[in-house]
Image: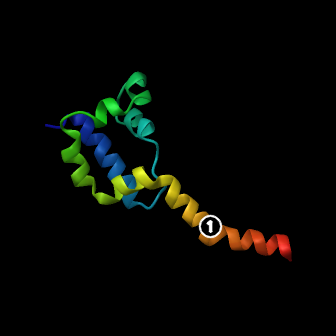
Amino acid sequence: MATLRQKLAASKMSENIRNGKLVKPMGQILKESGYSESVCKHPDRVTGARGWPKLEIQIGPEHTFLEKNRRNVFFTIFTILLLPIILGFIFS
């Protein structure tokens, strides 16, 4: 069963994703949820707990996708949107 702080962290993460903002680092979300500094430096202590997988399902698949593929997503956005602008500026 998930603890109150885990539920708070999951709701903050879900809210962050729904608002379309860039996903904050997990440590920062845990700090805002009331976890100690040592836990914030090692978020796997929270995400490895028994109750976390149930909360992850409630957050939705976009969370796991963004966490696992964050670099690929941002590189793709950079390549598609910014690279043509930069090249156009250089060669003009």
Percent coordinates x, y for residue 35 in the rendering: 35, 28
Q: Is residue 64 above or below residue 46?
A: below
Against 40, residue 26 (above or below) is below
Tell me what residue is drawn at x 81 percent, y 72 percent.
89
Q: Where is residue 22 in the image (x, y as percent from the top left)?
A: 49, 55
Q: Label 1 is placed on what type of residue? A: Thr
Q: Position of residue 7 (x, y in %)?
A: 24, 41
Q: How is the image coloured?
A: rainbow
Dot 1, how many residues are within 10 Å of its Cα: few (below 14), some (14-19), or many (20+)?
few
* Figure quadrant of residue 66: bottom left
- What residue is at 37 percent from the left and 60 percent from the top? 18
Residue 2 is drawn in which quadrant? top left
- Residue depicted at x 83% and y 70%: 90
Give the mark count.
1
Q: In which quadrant will I find the N terminus?
A: top left
**Residue closest to the far left:** 1
Mark 1 element type: helix
Of 56 and 17, the residue lying toward us: 56
Vertical placement of 43 versus 24: above or below? Answer: above
49 vs 85, left or right, is left
Looking at the image, which residue is at 35% across and 59% down? 62
Please give the residue where the numbered disc 1 appears in the rendered image. 79
Q: Judge from the rendering whether residue 39 lies leftward or rightward of residue 53; answer left or right.
A: right
Residue 80 placement (x, y as % from top left): 60, 71
